[in-house]
Image (cartoon, rainbow, N blue to C red):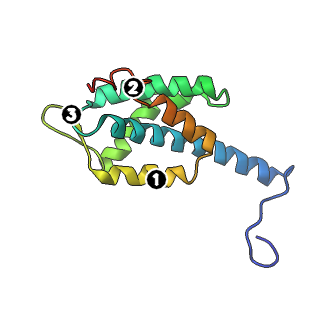
Amino acid sequence: MGVDGVLQPPDANSTEAYRLELLARSLRQLLERQYLIVALLTRFGPGQLTRKRLEELVQLLSQRLVLLFESATPDFYDRSALGSSIEMLFESGLVEEDAQGKLGFDDRIRVPGAQVERLLPVDSLQAIQRITSADAVPGAAQRE
């Protein structure tokens, strides 16, 4: 905190700056993963994907993102990490599974995506939007 009570970044070469950068990288990957999941759900629409298929697509597209952004760590596309991110949407009530195993959701699912859009860098958003476009996602054109 600065002298006038305004938040200021730490000196660039300080330990605090290094710690802040590590925290930002971790949060960025979490936010990218959540944005990818929401983008896929909205790309296919309610009642089109099963949880298993969503997990498969998220893992595949996460691997593609790692290739685009070499800075991403391998745990970015780790199955358990992806499963936890998907589980958070179930626990929050944003996604539900019907009797046939299809995933349902309403327009509330767009809220987390819109919030993340304000936090992620433009290059990350564009990359995720590009890899979740109908012609880039296996099965998206014909809708599962």
Residue at (79%, 79%) from the top-left corner?
A: 4
Sooner in the amino-acid sequence: mark 1 or mark 2? 2
Amino acid, disc 2: Leu
Query: Circle 2 sits in a helix, a strand or a loop, which is it?
Result: helix
Pick the front one: 141 or 125? 141
Report the residue marked by disc 2: 57
Residue at (45%, 22%) from the top-left corner?
A: 60
Query: Circle 1 sits in a helix, a strand or a loop, which is it?
Result: helix
Picture coordinates of residue 34, whole percent (x, y): 46, 42
With 124 as the anchor, is 78 left or right in this view? Answer: left
Image mark for residue 114 = 1
Report the residue marked by disc 3: 102
Q: Are marks 3 and 1 in contact (CB under 8 Å)?
A: no
Sooner in the amino-acid sequence: mark 3 or mark 1? 3
Residue at (24%, 32%) from the top-left corner?
A: 48
Picture coordinates of residue 89, whole percent (x, y): 35, 46
Which quarter of the figure is the N terminus placed in? bottom right
Amino acid, disc 3: Lys
Picture coordinates of residue 26, whole percent (x, y): 61, 42
Task: For label 3, count other residues whose C-alpha is less than 10 Å away and answer few (under 14), some (14-19) or many (20+).
Answer: some
Query: Circle 3 sits in a helix, a strand or a loop, which is it?
Result: loop
Image mark for residue 58 = none
* Residue 92 can be seen in this image: no
